[in-house]
Amino acid sequence: LRVRKNLRMCGLATLAALATLSLPSPRDPPHGLWINRRTLLSHGAAASVLLPLRKAPAAAPAAAGAGVAVYEIASAALDRRSYRGLRLANGLQVLLASDPAAGKAAAAMNVAVGSMSNPEAWQGLAHFCEHMLFLGTASYPDEGDFESYIASNGGSNNAYTDSEETVYFFDVGAGALPGALARFSDFFAAPLFTESATAREVAAIESEHSKNIQSDGWRTEQLLRATRGVSGHPYNGFFTGNRATLRDGGGGARAALLDFYGEYYRADQMDLSLLGPQSLDELQRLATEQFSRLPSRPGPPASAKYDPLGLPLSPDQGGGLGSGAVASPFATLVVPVREQRAVSATWCLPVADFDTWLACKPQVALSQLLTARADGSLLSLLKRKGLGTAIEVGVEEQTRSFAVVTASLALTEAGLAAWPTAMGHLFSYLRLCREKGVPSHVFDDAKALAQLGFRYAEPSQPQAFVTATAASMPLYRPAAWLSGPSLLEGAGGPPTLRQLLGGMTPRAAMVEVCAKEVAPKAPLSEQIYGTRYGRQPIEGEVAAWEAAPLLPELSLPRPNPFIPKRLAIKAPQTLPRKEGVPSPTPSLLPAADGARVHFLPDRTFGRPRAFAYFLWRSPEFYTSARTAVTAELFAGMLAEVLQEATYEAAQAGLVAASGVSSDAFTVQLGGYDERLPALATLVASTVRSFEPTQAAFERKVDILRRQLRDAERRQPISLAGYRRGLALQPARFSNEQLAAAAGEVSLSDVAAMQEGVLREAQLEAFVAGNLRENEAAEMVRGVRAALPAAPLAAERLPIRRLRRLPPGGATRQFLAGNPEEPNGALEMYLQVGPDEGDDWLHLLLLSQMIDKAVYAELRTKQQLGYIVQCGSTEADGVRGLVFIVQSSVQPPPELEARLEAFLRLFRGTLLLTSDEELDTYRESLAAQMQDVDQRADGQASRLWAEVATRRYDFGRPWRSSKRMRRVTRDGLIGFYDKYIAAGGAGRCRLSTHVFSQRSPPKGPLRDDPLPDAFFPPTADGFGVDWAADRAVV
């Protein structure tokens, strides 16, 4: 609906508090919960279980060092990692995590100062300081040294500035951790803040702001501050800053940076999280050696300046009517950039007991109540009345003194016209919760599920782990650094939720209506982003909401019947993961009618979870644009039915997803294995049995049409990728074609597709995890019985073709769809081809070497734009190299000219690369290739990708790793000269230019023709002896 800048987290999914699947994305929270980084919580449900906690051994006193305190860290009994907490003599808190199986090391530093500490005269200074720390330190003065070191050792790095903290993080090849920490620690000990970098980097801040100008998340967040902000509160400033607020990097900018850094960047206000395969003692030595030198200066925390100020937002603020002006209740009418219809209520509430809030996390229960999908839920009522399609609830901001809570309803066209009625239903449900009281089982289920999720958590990726833990460390005592963000503890849940609900009244709500349809009533413009808005008095509506009766259609949720009870591990854990040793591969189960069923029992991870993937290949979904739209609507309506039918199962840790693509229908399931077979049968039987209704059809058509209109208003760099896809995949339908077809499809078309769906199909299935072979076979039989399909003749199997570009180059130019978009974009695609010899390995190695160099030149030095990237890509088995640059300072042809100039010089860089540096790149990539299967869900996803693409090359990572180590400099330069260098015999270039409508080209747009030549379709790899030494990655 409305995505704020705040990072979305699924109950600390990065700490693996939940059983996660590749579907849905871990970045997308279940049932609409979204939260700010200050509130890291666990979401889900589980059986009531006793949680075995393991205390990590403390270091021997002699090993601790003078002035170093050592803490025990509680962790789950099954956690393979070991932990230790430290407090160095300078006050720095450190979490150490030793993971012998980790393929990478990682570190994150949380500095307890953020954008709420921006000086009034220097808006965006905290963000600017974050940028500047990457641009040279006393020991490593080269501005690109840190980036270069991390990239050449197979790592990545980034940082973010939030309201109350700034977090810096990286990962890197494990052997390179000492050098990375030496450079990283210098950020916080001796940054240079040079005059030249200060003057230059402000352009990057401006480019970042330019990227955000047309983002509805940034726009509506700033508008809330502008229209509801209490004068003088730092929460209502301009957090990211731009060239104007930072005075173009001059006018005392460097002095302001030095003052800000000197006041707030103190060791006692920092928290470091460090993970690697090294022992705890070695990690402690590295942390103490590198970070003990950080300065420790006396002073209060940054929050001391604003915690006493009171609430930053108020529904009674005039919002521009003048300092101290008070208005009658009003709704803010917002004109969005993208297609959406939503009404939201935001409350700014005092936090009476911050520690109790952190322990019991009342927003978990609040979200479960408001976003439920079962009968009696608010969403069920909104859908039944044709008013709404989705609900999101979450905490936008949390500090020690206040919380900003928002409930947002996605509306239908009829719902927008009757938005006060939709909001009335929301307030009626909140009143129900207050007057009837939230049942105790809501808290019990949530608490038990959090315990179960924590108990059976699997290790998250190193960078994700350190970033999440560093952000949450200031909020919890050391012993609870891991368990605190994940568990719901104490008896404070019911009273804290009652207090929260007590503040969520109609008169305290800040109401916002966001839709393009309100444009005639939006004469005002927000100063920073230019968001159009208006005000509508709602005194009458507020009075009606306050008097709204309890609705008989609404009820509180029942106890969850899907909570798992049987959690036994069914196979002996005889195959522990070992570095460099290939993982076990699936076996083929007997199946009739040409179906292929692959099975891999878990003997490695020891978790009571399983995963099941089903794919029916069929040509019936993409024969025309109308068919493609019908299939999309059918899939959307099915998904909606399944979301309601499986809601309680999803709460209890079971995930089910279905979808259609151009050549297949898929079902993916995962979670606690006890109920997985029954869930699989339910999903399969629903495909043909659910009733497509006119109301559901109209909802999905409306959503699809708005999505297609939105697609043309994406950022220019996204449009460039879309245009490349159309050029290379001629069978693909454009947004215009799909939009036209959406106007022709009827409910009868969807019903006809449902009736005939998958009557003939090729079934492929993969089952993995905590299941016995007979259970897996029985599950597949149940699915096939519920959704029978006759075998599909081989000649009817869908074939996907990719256009073969000729040697030379072609350019295609387009205008951005959003007339207000200030940026243009270049995408240069260099097509290489299918796997041949070592080409793919050369491509991977070159892309990693080029990426950091092109970023340093075009982004950091030339400041062409905030987005500058290079990477390898694959489509339908064909590989290529892609460069992307988005810029508001130069048009796409000039961006391409600058890129070509860079590539002409890069060959010299290759020649001058030392053997040692080349070895570093090779080894880091080789290690990355085989750093797979760290988690059960990750292993299942990787193996399923081999099945779904019909490669079946399950040992690919380890074989490719060996080949990478044998790549030579001569081979790499030969590949560069053939495919990358201008004039190369095999260089096949497709350049896509997207111009801002504000700066169109002077002449006509280029549209160079492309030949009708195609690569042969990818061959079926079933039965191939992949043990042969072949360079396939």
Image: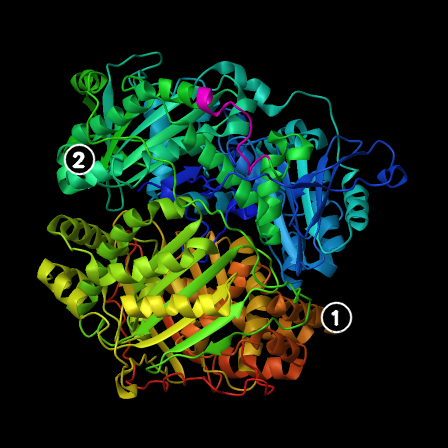
| The magenta stretch spans residue 299 | no
Q: Is residue 85 above or below residue 604?
A: above
Other-residue count near label 1 (Cα within 10 Å), few / some / many at <14 / 14–19 / ≥20:
few
Looking at the image, what colour scheme do you see?
rainbow
Of tags 2 and 1, which is closer to the observer? Answer: 2
Range shown magenta: 484-496
User: Under tag 2, what secondary structure?
Assistant: helix
Q: Which residue is disc 2 drawn over?
A: 518
Q: CA distance from mark 2 to mark 1?
A: 62 Å
Q: In the image, what residue type sits under mark 1?
A: Glu
Give the left or right position of residue 1015, taking residue 486 as reference: left
Give the quarter of the figure containing the N terminus. Answer: top left
How far across and how far down the image is residue 365, in percent?
Answer: 41, 32
- Please name the residue that numbered disc 1 is placed on: 916
Residue 72: mark in rendering: none
**Tags 2 and 1 touching, CB below 8 Å:** no
Q: Horizontally, is 638 left or right of 626 in the view?
A: right
Q: Position of residue 1025 (x, y in %)?
A: 54, 88
Quarter of the rendering containing residue 638: bottom left
Residue 801: which quarter of the image?
bottom left
Q: Quadrant of residue 780?
A: bottom left
Q: Residue furthest right?
A: 62
Nearest to the observer: residue 387 or residue 488 = 488
Q: Tell me, yes or no, if residue 863 can be seen here.
A: yes
Q: Secondary structure at mark 1?
A: helix
Percent position of residue 459, x then y: 60, 52
Q: Say which label, 2 or 1, has the lower sequence index.
A: 2
Q: Is residue 746 visible?
A: no
* 498 relative position to 546: left or right: right
Mark 2 surroundings: few (<14), some (14-19) or many (≥20) residues within 10 A: some
